[in-house]
Amino acid sequence: MSSASAPGKIILFGEHAVVYGRPALAVPVTQVHADVEVLDASEDGIWIEAPDIDLHAELKSLPSGHPLAVVINKLFPHPGPSPCGAEAPCFARRGVNIKITSTIPVASGLGSGAAVSVALTRALSLHLGRPMTNEQVNAIAYETEKIHHGTPSGIDNTVITYARPVFFIKGRPIETFKVGRPFTIVIGDTGIQAPTREAVADVRRLWEADRPKWERVFDEIGGIAGKAKEKIEAGESEALGELMNRNHTLLQELTVSSPELDGLVEAARKAGAAGAKMSGGGRGGNMIALVRPEAAETVAGCLKDAGAKRTIITLVS
């Protein structure tokens, strides 16, 4: 058996603007994760079991554009009974069972799709004795992100692949960074599934209708992300609260927040959070709040009272 795991993620600053070349900050969330096990099987073919999404199928029965099929076919171009070359192990003579489980809520802004892709890529490549580099894993995960999100920035697959805080600018070399002093974030989940693809498409329509206006908004969001990185590296996390609040206001202007997200953001601030904002694609999914460690449980409780379906307390370090 071979296995691999990949964490979830949250975007601290810069969502949506990152699609337009501005920087964004994201960090892994290890409290939730996707796990993949690969075992040899007596039965020919590639069999996939993903109970969380009620999937029990042989690879050939999946549409070619299915995210799981894309990952597997990227790794192994010729699975099945046809003759295989040296670079494509022949599954006609080697059955494989793949089991996928995940504690990451789907379509909630925590990177569930990217985490599954990363864990699946690593587990399969290990199983065949061809472990991949982070760069190779990241490239495959990005291809599947296109299926999930249409025109993704690449930030989700990057922070999940490297499992480190990432300062990300689309098209530029990956830049990880150090946290000068750990700080605590409470994540509140609205429980509303909101595919990122739709929000990204709506923002693009706004931008195409009035590019100068929204370029200014993207510039300000990118500037906030840059300032936040400086504060985090300097260990001045208390300054992040005000930046979060302003970033949330700008995301509201982009129409990607929602009444549920706004309600949780307001509840967190009233409970004593230094700042709060939506995180991810929006229209549902998650929000985040910067809190003192001793206040984390209190803020989490207030978020549940305000309608959060679940909360996660995570230490960014």
Image (spheres, rainbow, N blue to C red):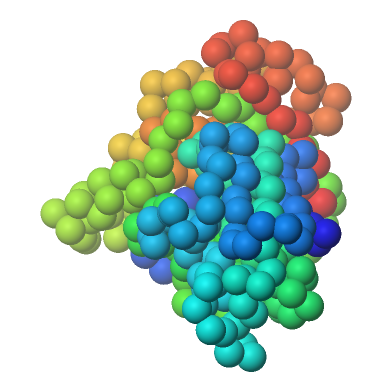
The tally of labels here is 0
Compare residues 223 and 61 and report the one nearer the observer: 61
User: Does any portion of residue 277 appear in the rendered image?
Assistant: no
- Residue projecting furthest to the left: 209
Residue at image position (31%, 37%) is: 255
In the displayed structure, 294 sits above or below 40; it is: above
Q: Position of residue 301 (x, y in %)?
A: 71, 14
Task: Name above or below for residue 42 compared with residue 313.
Answer: below
Q: Nearer the viewer, residue 169 or 144?
A: 144
In the visual, does 201 lie left or right of 275?
A: left
Quarter of the image that includes the N terminus? bottom right
168 left or right of 128 in image? left
Q: Residue at x 49, y 39 (%)?
A: 107
Q: Position of residue 272 (x, y in %)?
A: 69, 21
Would residue 131 appear left or right of 68 to someone viewing this image?
right
On the question of residue 95 being in view, the answer is: yes
Determine the residue positioned at 62% across, 8% down. 305
Q: Position of residue 130 (x, y in %)?
A: 74, 80
